[in-house]
Image (tube, rainbow, N blue to C red):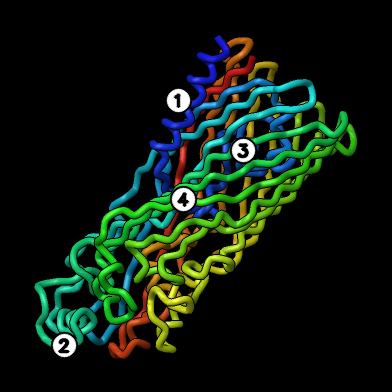
Amino acid sequence: MSGMKGNIVLALAVAAAVAAPSAFATYGYFSHGYGMKAKGMAGASTALAEDTFGGANNPASMVWVGDRLDLGIDWFSPIRNAERSGSANGIDGSEKSKSDDFFIPEFGYNKMLGPDMSFGVTVYGNGGMNTNYPGGTISTPTGRGLCNFFQTGTLGPGKSSYNLLCGDGNVGVDLAQLVIAPTLAFKLNASNSVGISPLLGYQRFKAEGLQGFVGLSNDSSNLTNNGYDTSTGFGARIGWQGKVSNMVTLGAAYSSKINMKKFKKYQGLFAEAGDFDMPANWSVGMAVKAAPKSTVTLDYQKIEYSGIKAVNNSSGNALTGALLGEDGGPGFGWKDIKVWKLGYEFQLSSATTLRAGYGRTDNPIGSSDVTFNILAPGVVQNHITLGFTTAVDKSSELTMAYMHAAENKVSGSSLFTSLGAGPSGNEEIKMYQNSLGIAWGKKW
């Protein structure tokens, strides 16, 4: 029977891994939370131990949750728009990304190996550089001539039309990152625990419609329209959780950078010849039992995008002669971000718990990098969440969570102006989001 259970768990983990192309772009391109209970509290979970998503939140929490299985799915809808206006060279346009609906599974399992030790696995994803703007936006004679120059180096009538970035057909990128986190956790005493999760990373990426950047790449054959490329890599997350009083629990977790193999098909797009690691990040948190039925949680998180040159390098590096694909080549200009997460949990009855949360994050994108970030407009900052858990029977429960990220926008002068295209006007990117998820949890 135990062998059968192990095979079922393995099969579910593999299924989640295969089926988890993600589209999160809430805290940069990290999710606002991992596990449906955390999502109901804006992700404030570093000091909580309620489900099997410690491999994504805090590995030390797993030893407190017992034998447990969690399965869920989240509908995620990011609405992205990009616009260029006021150009004097015929390249104005406004488009909405066509990719609006995504379904992201989640999976976690934990098994107690004794009273003071547990082993489990968490499967989670990141993403968000997922856009798909239609082609045919630029159709004026002067605009076609300009786009032809960026593609071929020759002024002329060019093709009948171009996309918003002077390429052919639809323009956009698709990045999905998946992490499998086997987790070992130990109780140090009755109040403290530590945990470690080796992080097994998998990611896939494709870009299309970027022919307008041919002259900016050191390897234009590996710049765009090469289909999906994949890479794998390794990292680690460690954590501590401690109950310092009957009212207060503290937690801390750190994840190293996950060093990924390079995207060979896009070594002419990303800095360092296609290198695209997953960034290091860390969090500290506190959970306060404010009343017998009320718990308030507060997390602070930092995500270190500056450690990933493909993401952190400024798009303005193109103005110094640096080419896409080189170590110092143009990138998205994303900065490190700080995230504050505030959550509230109220036990309505012995069967039902209610949740709410608010998350506030920095915007990683500045006005000087808008052109490149038409591809990845991760600009939302304010998140409001609601959620609940209700018992199905003595050992199983259902959890739901909703998130709304308010619309935010960033605008700036078009990079095309600085690249010698003449007055190319102003560009604006904006996004808002909604998500709604449901999960089933089973305890033994």
> Disc 4 marks which residue?
232
Is residue 190 shown above or below 263? above
Tell which circle, 2 or 3, labels the residue nearer the N-terminal end: 3
The mark nearer the N terminus, 1 or 4, is 1
**At which x and y percent is residue 3?**
54, 15
User: Callout 1: 10 Å neighbours few (<14), some, many (20+)?
Assistant: few
Label 2 CA crowd tier, 10 Å (few <14, some 14–19, many 20+): few
Front position in the image: 136 or 50: 50
Q: Secondary structure at mark 4?
A: strand
Q: Which residue was labeled with disc 2?
A: 154
Mark 2 and mark 4: span between their CA atoms? 40 Å
| Figure quadrant of residue 305 | bottom right
Judged from the image, the secondary structure of the residue bearing numbered disc 2 is: loop
Q: Earlier in the sequence, mark 2 or mark 4?
A: 2
Percent position of residue 285, x then y: 75, 47
Which kind of residue does numbered mark 4 sit on?
Answer: Thr
Label 1, label 4: how far apart the Cα atoms are: 20 Å
State which tag comes first along the sequence, 3 or 4.
Answer: 3
